[in-house]
């Protein structure tokens, strides 16, 4: 009886550890996901977006520095009190740049 109990509790502990592991993995994925600020084309607000892909770095004389374009997905955002902007589209945006505008958005 004691042995059976030990086996059952061991199973529970392993199961719990598995769940914990899974949670940790999701957390890590969330942390490594890179977020930047872009301007939403629908509401013109500065919004957060997740970087999906990055292109080659390009030199630009006008900013005397480098820029990198990529594809981003706009995250859900508010446009006012309890009003959501429906634009969560995938757009091409500057994901890295030596130059930023007044709102610290890459330009
Ligand atoms: Zn918007």
Image (spheres, grey):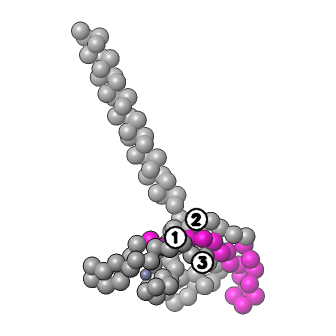
Q: Earlier in the sequence, mark 2 or mark 3?
A: 2
Look at the numbered disc 2 and give the secondary structure of its residue.
Answer: strand
Work out how far the residue at label 2 is from the one at label 1, CA to CA, in angstroms. Answer: 7 Å
Work out how far the residue at label 3 is from the one at label 1, CA to CA, in angstroms. Answer: 10 Å
Do residues under tags 2 and 1 come within 8 Å of each other at their CB atoms? yes
Q: Nearer the viewer, residue 45 or 104?
A: 45
Tag 1 residue: 73
Q: Which mark is residue 52?
A: 2
The answer to whether 10 is drawn above or below residue 73 in the figure is above
Q: Earlier in the sequence, mark 2 or mark 1?
A: 2
Q: Is residue 45 left or right of residue 104?
A: left
Look at the numbered disc 3 and give the secondary structure of its residue.
Answer: strand
Residue 98 pos. (x, y %) = 65, 80
Residue 16 pos. (x, y %) = 34, 34
Magenta run includes residue 60 = yes
The answer to whether 78 is drawn above or below residue 63 in the figure is above
Task: Give the residue displayed 62% in from the left and 65% down from the top.
Answer: 53
Q: Is residue 2 left or right of residue 52?
A: left
Q: Earlier in the sequence, mark 3 or mark 1?
A: 1
Tag 3 residue: 93
User: Magenta segment range?
Assistant: 57-75
Magenta run includes residue 107 = no
Q: Is residue 66 left or right of residue 3?
A: right
- Most common SS among magenta residues: strand
Q: Quick check: can you spot residue 16?
A: yes
Q: Quadrant of residue 45?
A: bottom left
**Tag 1: Cα neighbours inside 10 Å, few (<14), some, or many (≥20)?**
many
């Amino acid at each position: 009886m004691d042995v059976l109990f030990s086996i059952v509790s061991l199973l529970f502990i392993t199961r719990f550890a598995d769940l914990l592991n899974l949670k940790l993995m999701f957390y890590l994925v969330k942390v490594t996901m890179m977020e930047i600020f872009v301007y939403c084309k629908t509401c013109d607000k500065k919004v957060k977006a997740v970087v999906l892909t990055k292109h080659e770095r390009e030199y630009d004389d006008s900013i005397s520095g480098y820029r990198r374009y990529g594809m981003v997905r706009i995250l859900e955002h508010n446009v006012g009190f309890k009003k959501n902007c429906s634009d969560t589209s995938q757009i091409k945006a500057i994901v890295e740049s030596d130059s930023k505008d007044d709102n610290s958005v890459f330009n």
